[in-house]
């Protein structure tokens, strides 16, 4: 049984990224109840630009962010880069180091504070595998980035 956490935007993003589609009903109902926006997706690549582009595209297509507002895209970008740092253990490189990733991601946007004047925040969670570009030689990895909008 998942314990719901109202103000834990990062925890909710991580749970959404970790859960399989058939398991995510409770967390999506919780996010809907909070009136938070969210989306999920997958990306596999040896290029960091593709990870950033996949997350940004999904967030725009699912109306989590407005692609025409710089502050929203800027906040999302920094949350993605912070999450990638966790995935890559601080060395934000993939292909140049002969590493590849297969990731599921979740983006969650909401107001995690009781005081609404604190504004909206955005969290990006990445979960999957990283390793040599040879199937079976990868291991699990996870990253989380949170930024204010």
Image (cartoon, helix red, strand yellow):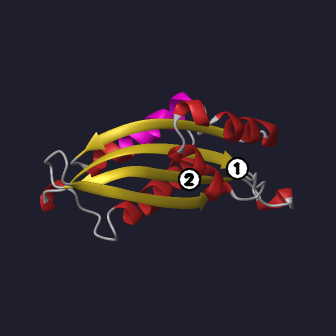
The answer to which of 30 and 39 lies nearer the viewer is 30
User: From the viewer's perspective, is the residue at label 2 or at label 1 nearer?
Assistant: 1
Relative horizontal placement of residue 22, taking residue 1 as reference (left or right): left
**CB under 8 Å between discs 2 and 1:** no
Percent coordinates x, y for residue 29 in the rendering: 74, 35
SS at mark 1?
Answer: loop
Q: Residue at x 19, y 56 (%)?
A: 99
- For disc 1, the marked residue is 2
Disc nearer the start of the sequence (2/1): 1
Q: Residue at x 60, y 36 (%)?
A: 23
Relative horizontal placement of residue 9, taking residue 112 as reference (left or right): left
- For disc 2, the marked residue is 14
Q: Residue at x 34, y 69 (%)?
A: 89
Percent coordinates x, y for residue 118 in the rendering: 78, 62
SS at mark 2?
Answer: helix
Magenta region:
53-62
Residue sticking out furthest to the bottom: 90
Mark 1 Cα shell of 10 Å, populated few (<14), some (14-19), many (≥20)? few
Q: Is residue 67 visible?
A: no
Quadrant of the image occupied by residue 90: bottom left
Q: Which mark is residue 65?
A: none
Task: State how many labels appear.
Answer: 2
The answer to which of 52 and 135 lies nearer the viewer is 135
Quadrant of the image occupied by residue 131: bottom left
Q: Is residue 28 visible?
A: yes
Percent coordinates x, y for residue 125 in the rendering: 50, 52
Percent coordinates x, y for residue 48 in the rendering: 28, 51
Magenta highlight: main SS: helix
From mark 2 to mark 1, how far is it between C-alphas?
12 Å
Relative horizontal placement of residue 41, taking residue 101 as reference (left or right): right
Does 1 appear in magenta?
no
Mark 2 Cα shell of 10 Å, populated few (<14), some (14-19), many (≥20)? many
């Amino acid at each position: 049984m998942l314990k719901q956490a109202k103000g834990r935007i990062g925890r909710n993003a991580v749970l959404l990224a970790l859960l399989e589609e058939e398991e995510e009903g409770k967390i999506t109902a919780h996010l809907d109840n909070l009136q938070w926006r969210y989306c999920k997706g997958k990306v596999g690549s040896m290029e960091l630009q593709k990870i950033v582009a996949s997350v940004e595209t999904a967030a725009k297509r699912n109306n989590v962010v407005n692609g025409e507002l710089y502050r929203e895209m800027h906040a999302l970008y920094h949350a993605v880069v912070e999450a990638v740092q966790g995935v890559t253990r601080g060395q934000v490189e993939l292909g140049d180091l002969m590493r590849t990733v297969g990731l599921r991601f979740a983006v969650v946007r909401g107001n995690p504070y009781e005081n609404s004047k604190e504004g909206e925040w955005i969290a990006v969670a990445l979960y999957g595998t990283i390793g040599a570009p040879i199937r079976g030689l990868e291991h699990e990895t996870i990253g989380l980035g949170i930024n204010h909008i």
